[in-house]
Amino acid sequence: MAIYESEHTKFMREWLEKHPKELDEQKKGRALWWDKPQDVATQKRYDESSVPVKAYYYDTHY
């Protein structure tokens, strides 16, 4: 069974092989936007302080 690989995936794989320094830039960008340290106590406070959303948000009778 052949595994499908899109043209875009093939292009990116080849491009990254030719430009290996871009992997470092990719990791820096990910660290900037996504990889943040997690604090369990802060997350617990966020979870406890969340307010339930109404079934129909624009209903003014509740």
Image (tube, rainbow, N blue to C red):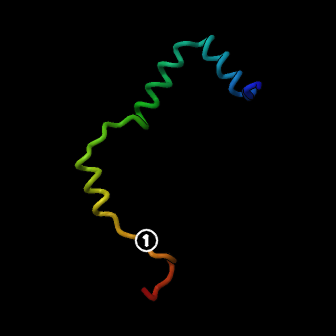
Q: Quadrant of residue 62?
A: bottom left
Q: Quadrant of residue 35?
A: top left
List x then y, in percent, for residue 10.
Answer: 71, 22
Q: Residue at x 41, y 33 (%)?
A: 32
Q: Secondary structure at mark 1?
A: loop
Reply above or below: 11 against 61: above
List x then y, in percent, for residue 58.
Answer: 51, 79
Identify residue type, mark 1. Answer: Val
Q: Quadrant of residue 33?
A: top left
List x then y, in percent, for residue 55.
Answer: 49, 76
Total labels drawn: 1
Reply above or below: 30 against 24: below
Label 1 crowd (10 A; few <14 / some 14-19 / many >=20) = few
Label 1 sits on residue: 53
Question: Outermost residue, left direction?
Answer: 41
Question: Outermost residue, bottom direction?
Answer: 61
Q: Residue at x 50, y 83 (%)?
A: 59
Q: Residue at x 74, y 28 (%)?
A: 4
Q: Does residue 23 appear left or right of residue 15 in this picture?
A: left
Reply above or below: 58 against 13: below
Of residue 29 and residue 37, the one placed in the foreground of this image is 37
List x then y, in percent, for residue 11.
Answer: 70, 21
Q: Residue at x 45, y 75 (%)?
A: 54
Instruction: Please identify the quadrant where the N terminus is shown.
Output: top right
Q: Does residue 3 appear left or right of residue 62 in this picture?
A: right
